Amino acid sequence: DSRYDFNTIEEKWQKIWEEKKIYRVNEKSTKEKYYVLEMFPYPSGRIHMGHVRNYSIGDVIARYKRLRGFNVLHPMGWDAFGLPAENAAQKNNSHPADWTYSNIDYMRRQLRRLGLSYDWQREIATCNPEYYRWEQLLFIEMFEKGIVYQKETKVNWCETCQTVLANEQVIEGCCWRCDEAVHPREMSGWFFKITDYAEELLADLDLLKGWPEKVITMQRNWIGKSTGLTCNFSVDGSELTIPIFTTRPDTIFGVTFMSIAPEHPLLEELVQGTEKEDEVKEFAKEIIIEKQRRNIEEEPEKRGIFTGRYCINPFDNSKIPIYVANFVLMEYGTGAVMAVPAHDERDFEFARKYNLEIRPVVQPDDTILDPATMETASTLPGTLVDSGEFTGMDSVKAQAAIIAYAEQHGFGGPHVTYRLRDWGISRQRYWGAPIPMVHCEKCGVQPVACEELPVLLPEDAKGETCSPLHQRQSFIKTTCPQCGAAARRETDTMDTFMESSWYFARYTCPRFIDAPLDREKASYWLPVDQYIGGVEHAILHLLYSRFFTKVLRDLGYLDIDEPFTNLLTQGMVIKDGSKMSKSKGNVVDPHDLVQQYGADTVRLFSLFAAPPERDLEWNAQGVEGASRFLNRVYRFISAHRDILVQHQDIPVQPGPDGKALNRKTHQTIKRVTETIENNFHFNTAISAMMELFNVLSSLVGDSGESQVEPGIIKESVTTLLVLLSPMVPHFTAEMWEIAGNPGSVEDQPWPVYDIEAAREELLTIVVQVMGKVRSRLQVDPDISDEELIKLAMSDENARKFIADKPVRKTIVVKKKLVNIVI
Ligand code: ANZ
Ligand code: ZN
């Protein structure tokens, strides 16, 4: 059989790489560093095609940069805490740790089988106490710096199971496990003050020149900075004032009511002792429950209730009713909205429903706003009407003027708000890193003494499988680190986003035992030069990692502001038009493919089928095609082994075929290098290499009888192998050896192209004047028409016939002639 034996070859080279330790790196190199990282996987069980694609892209970049002479860090690990492990453990009556570690073992074997160039010595599993102990220390240091705090939040509580449920675990208002009704409950939780960093997280987006624009936009929207006015409205007949936040101060004369959130702290006082008290409180309670139940994306029908109270608009002293409304969020702005139905859609809907006044105050250029007939709010800019001393002013200019007025009169001023909320990191789950705090009656909440770290996740006793920590008395009982009295251990575990927010830094010193990070090593390797992963992580994971980087900097562990210099978000792997997923039943298991075709073919296919940022449509012929290509190269090299194994001089004056092959070789080096450097479009690079191979095999043929000089054949083959080696490393290593080359392909320098050799043959172009041949030009085949006309018109022989007559027009026949009409 003339197919290459990928099984033997791939096993052989993986063993050699391992023995030679060629992917291990340290900081003592004189080469420039390059850190390439793929987002680490969750150890769910087995590798899927999305992983193969992600890691193949990363591996090509790592191997390419190594050949370009960089000291390349390319690590891998496991994002190992999380709910699926608990669910699986419960189902199989085993322990999440067993499930997780056995998945890791299996998946590690699968990754090794793909021949990825990781420095496995740096492997991290985030559920390992040697990892999370540092996270606990960081938590304590953040607590001491005031970046961590505790506050009451509403959670879904199941009385029967005595546990908090994540939103996804509440199914139609009931517990997913016992089917009993779930109730909202106030519970204290731990938060990171990411909002303290909102401005920096926003401003530093400008530094991220190597990030896709769409990811920058998603981050910007998530942070959601709004600039506007806060203004105090006093409550009629009381000392109370209610501050509002608006981004449209220009509409302040159009306010016809006020809406407040059901949780608004002043609501209670507002209705106390009034006849509406019970009705309003009941309504507010109902809305709060309803809010808890619904998905964040759902827009409920607008509902509200009049509180019976009024407040005063300080700009015109008009008296406006106060409503409680279900669409006002307590977490945004001030929890109270000045409602302008003429210019805000939500307010418009609400006003129509409850028959409230609609008062237009911003008149756009070409429409008349009639409150009686308006069908939607008008959000256009325009000229202010019915707006007191601001009437006639341009609405955009009026914003600043109105803010200034409020400031002068002492009832308001400019205000910036962010959509970004503080990061709630408490989870009432078992399989996570315990939060290292202790509650003491006397001393209050205290961090665990650093020498006591890690706070280990307790092992399960019989019948305890995965029960949350607050149900484990032996874990809870402890002593106060301050006074030594009996105290209660914190039972929340950390959000698993914590682990993935700094793992990239820990890879620089994964076994360091004195601190979370070894500053020297971290500053040598960081930032990550190229980060690669799915676009589904474009918001939270990247934002949290950016935040953590800034926190680590402020704690003195890092000296960088941003973690990832360049970001590549790869597309999905799809089949028959939809994402490959178990639920759709359209999964192709890479394991089977590797069995059938070998790792190199699977890698080549996944790189060739689409550029990295686009979705990759699975097709079986594509895999076949990749396999066929490698086998053709294999047969060619085997057939010409006699020439390849000997030393061959490169002729100074090759014949036409030799010259053509040599040209193609150098053109290919140029194209492949430029494509990789520009945008990692490996599909284009691979096409170029396939073209080179086509030229090579057609000029040289199957047997020894060709016009091409052996030295040129040999140079072309070795070049092709080096260019291909980042994509199909086992194959090229073997071919390198078969072709009798010294050393190994992964130690070669990346080929450099010779501009002269790459240049196309000059073309001969005929120059005509009035249709008669007058001269001939030797030009570059890539010459532009304009350039060609310029040359033709200044040609000495042509000039004689043009003389001083004006040129009326010029006609270019591509690659053939220029005709000058006078
Ligand atoms: C009056 C107004 C008139 C508004 C108008 C808009 C248009 P962005 O721009 O997204 O930041 N708002 C303020 N606090 C709110 C809360 N807690 N819950 C719900 N809505 C709230 O949104 C700011 C606008 O959202 C604010 O400007 C306010 O409505 C509303 F023609 O005030 B505006
Ligand atoms: Zn104490």
Image: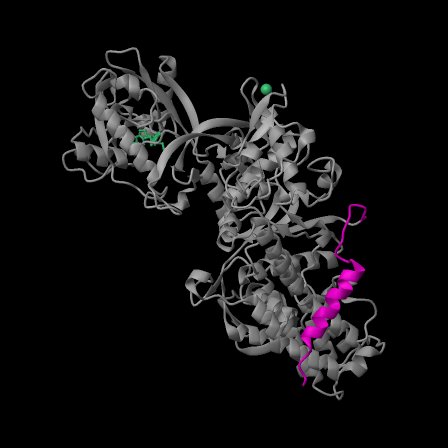
* Residue 768 in view: no
Quarter of the view holding residue 54 = bottom right
Does 669 appear in magenta?
A: no
Q: Nearer the viewer, residue 468 or 377?
A: 468
Judged left or right of residue 178, residue 821 is right
Q: Is residue 495 at least partly visible in the picture?
A: yes
Locate residue 728, reporting x and y percent.
67, 68
Pick out the residue farthest to the front.
462
Quarter holding the N terminus?
bottom right
**Which sits in the foreground, 707 or 495?**
495
- Residue 576, located in which quarter of the rendered image? bottom left
Image region (quadrant) for ligand 2: top right
* Residue 560 x %, y %: 66, 36
State the image coordinates of residue 690 (x, y, percent, origin top left).
Answer: 63, 73
Q: Is residue 67 left or right of residue 261?
A: right
The residue at 39%/16% (across/down) is 407
- Residue 324 percent across, percent down from the top left: 26, 27
- The correct choice, above or below, for 179 with respect to 640 in the image is above
Res 732 quadrant in image? bottom right
Furthest-left residue in this view: 372
Q: Nearer the viewer, residue 37 or 189?
A: 189
Residue 24 is covered by the magenta coloring: yes
For the point 29% across and 20% down, the residue is 268
The colour scheme is one colour
Which residue sits at x=66%, y=48%?
Answer: 124
Which residues are the magenta region?
A: 1-30
Residue 753's place in the image compared with 402, above or below, is below
Query: For this view, does 428 lie left or right of residue 672?
Result: left
Task: Using residue 664 as the reference point, say whether residue 610 is left or right of it.
Answer: left
